Image: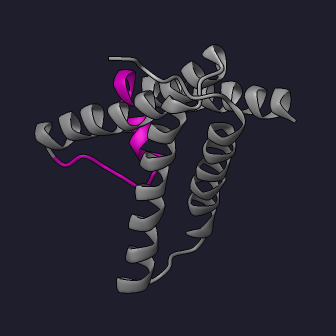
Amino acid sequence: MRLVITALLFVGGLFFSFVGVGFLTDPVASAAGFGLAPDSTMGLATIRADLTAFFLVAGFCMVWGAWRRNGDPLLIAAALFAVAFIGRAVNAAVVGAYEGFWVPMLVEAAAVALNLAGSRVLPHRVIAD
């Protein structure tokens, strides 16, 4: 089971890292896949910076945790995806649902569950003073 979780974390982390690189290199096309369209240079910079940061940090933490067999960085990725999930849930409650709204929420929930499972299965490194 540990090997399967580690492999899923590694592959998922690579996937999210590639999504992050896509936002860095081609933010307009990547943003369109998320229902976003920049209306100014500032909007383009925001998409390029914030979404790249979100996906690269989450992906890197997943790959790092899987590669080093360390559960600590997986908590960071779990927190990022949990906040994204909560944001979508609040949006669905306040503004309403849109067609297919559950798909990204399912991906985020699965990422949270996978990262938390990995954090439980993989050891945590205690840093001595």
Give the image location of residue 18, x and y in percent. 54, 24
41 or 53: nearer the viewer = 53
Image quarter of the N terminus: top right
Image quarter of the C terminus: top left
Give the image location of residue 10, x and y in percent. 67, 24
Residue 3 in the figure: left or right of residue 23: right
6 or 27: nearer the viewer = 6
Residue 47 in the figure: left or right of residue 34: left
Q: Residue at x 74, y 27 (%)?
A: 6
Give the image location of residue 67, x and y in percent. 64, 15
- Quadrant location of residue 56? top left
Q: How is the image coloured?
A: one colour
- Quadrant location of residue 64? top right
Q: Which residues are magenta?
A: 23-39
Is residue 1 rendered magenta in the image? no
Give the image location of residue 98, x and y in percent. 51, 76
- Quadrant location of residue 118? top right
Residue 31 in the figure: left or right of residue 1: left
Q: Residue at x 44, y 49 (%)?
A: 79
Is residue 25 rendered magenta in the image? yes
17 or 82: nearer the viewer = 82
* Image: 16 above or below 102: above
Q: Residue at x 19, y 49 (%)?
A: 39
Q: Residue at x 25, y 32 (%)?
A: 49
**Callout count:** 0
* Image: 77 above or below 123: below
Q: Residue furthest right?
A: 1
